[in-house]
Image: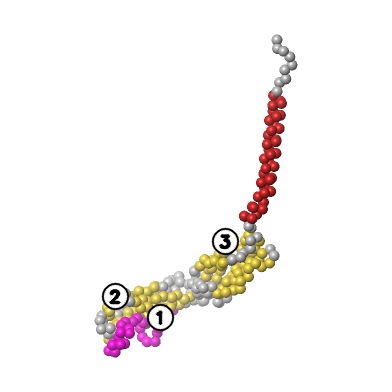
Amino acid sequence: MPSAAARVLGLALFLLPVSAPHAEAAAAWSLAPAGTGRPSFYAEGAPGTVLQDTVSVTNRGHKPLTVRLRGTGVRIAFARTGLRVPARTRAEVPFTVTVPAGAAPGDRSGTITARGADGRTAAVSLRLRVGGPALSALTVEHVAVHGDRITYELVNRGTTTLVPKLAVRADGLFGPVLDRPARSLKVHLAPASRRTLSEPWPGRPALDAVDVRLTVTAAGGAHDTTHTSARFVPWGEVTAALGAPVAAASLVAVRRSRRRRSSTEDGEHADTEVEPTGAVT
């Protein structure tokens, strides 16, 4: 594929040879890269580059075909987005793919789709590789324990799409209480993207202090480990167990308070009482 900044405005039409009726019924129209032998599009360039290619719409029917082209996933500009293809004709539409100026090295994926007036669609995938060194980097962040789940966030800090592996270990006061070896997650993490995930933890300790460690790895040498701590206390049982002693202590305190108040009141009355010493004349 040539890599040059270009604005493409052409549209080529080619007549097709007559085919058998059953072949026509099998595929009235189709979408494919121009030329032969390419099942999909591939483009490669440095950030800021404008790349050029051509898509082909083939109408094998006996009636004109109207389709509309659309590109998704990457920055695609067609010479024409809407076109009318005569019967038994192939139309070739040039287009450009622009690599963003600040794009990080790595792979991007897109799709070119054609939609007919009857609602039928056809699509061809497009793979864009941004030039630069491939870097595999992954971090695990914001680890926390919530009830019977461990939540965390994965961040792809490299330039390639990653399929992470996760290992989980938790050590309590008397040894390990959770030990899960590394396993692949059903996640495809694109460059510069992040995902919040959770790990179930059924049967976690009811009473313990644990250190939780999450380790993530991925192809290319990506590796990261993060720790967090958790304290498990069955507060309902503790409150029930301490309820009777606490209530008894409270009752004793109330009684002592009442006794002190009674003694104080008696003392005040004694100080203000006057004893008569004789008759008043």
Instruction: Tell me where the magenta segment starts and ends, as one range.
Output: 16-45
Residues packed near mark 1 inside 10 Å, few (<14), some (14 to 19) or many (20 plus): many
Residue 227: x, y in percent?
A: 61, 65
Residue drawn at point x = 36 percent, y = 82 percent = 32
The circle drawn on residue 146 is 3
Residue drawn at point x = 32 percent, y = 79 percent = 93
- Of all residues, the one furthest to the top in this rendering is 281
Q: Is residue 170 above or below residue 245?
A: below
Residue drawn at point x = 63 percent, y = 68 percent = 178
Q: Earlier in the sequence, mark 1 or mark 2?
A: 1
**Local SS, label 2:** loop
The circle drawn on residue 117 is 2
Amino acid on which the number 2 mark rests in the picture:
Ala
Q: Is residue 250 above or below residue 117?
A: above
In magenta segment, residue 153: no
Amino acid on which the number 1 mark rests in the picture:
Phe
Report the quarter where the C terminus lies: top right
**Residue 189 shows in the view:** yes
Closest to the camera, between mark 2 and mark 3, is: 3
Observer-nearest of 80 and 185: 185
Residue drawn at point x = 48 percent, y = 75 percent = 106
Amino acid on which the number 3 mark rests in the picture:
His
As measured in the structure, the alpha-carbon distance from the residue carrying label 2 to the one carrying label 3 is 52 Å
In magenta segment, residue 30: yes
Q: Which residue is mark 1?
A: 41
